[in-house]
Image (cartoon, rainbow, N blue to C red):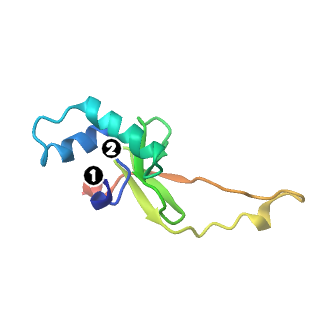
Amino acid sequence: MIRNTGRPLGPEEILEGARRVVDGLGIATVYRAIKDWTGEGKLVPVEISGQPPKVEIAGLKHHHHFCCEACGRVFELEGCGLHFNASLPTGFAVKRHEVTLYGRCGDCTA
């Protein structure tokens, strides 16, 4: 279910989608599954400032996120066009970076 959405999901979103297939599923089961799958390396946490924790499929190519300030959904933005090396002070070396864009998604803009 998480793979089919193409975006990070929170436990409540996972529960909502999973209940379409498994009637009576509870949130505790969802939290246990998230913990197990994260421990197995199948999911990775996605932390967005001001948002409850979300997870996405592990092993995705480097990407960034867009957070809709109206509905709270988080979307994956494919690829990365950022190049920091030219603006770094001498002797600095970037190992990784995280970028989150904030605004309104297409549904909330309409």
Q: Where is residue 23 in the image (x, y as percent from the top left)?
A: 10, 40
Furthest toward the top, the residue is 28
* 35 displayed left or right of 21: right
The correct choice, above or below, for 61 with respect to 34 in the image is below
For label 1, the SS is: helix
Q: In which quarter of the image is residue 62?
A: bottom right
Q: Where is residue 80 in the image (x, y as percent from the top left)?
A: 56, 67
Q: Where is residue 34 in the image (x, y as percent from the top left)?
A: 37, 41
Q: Mark 1 points at which residue?
A: 108
**Amino acid on which disc 2 is placed:** Ala
For label 2, the SS is: loop
Q: Name the residue under label 2.
A: 70
Residue occupying the point 85% across, 57% down:
89
Residue occupying the point 46% across, 35% down:
50
**Amino acid on which disc 1 is placed:** Cys
The correct choice, above or below, for 25 with respect to 87 in the image is above
* 23 displayed left or right of 70: left
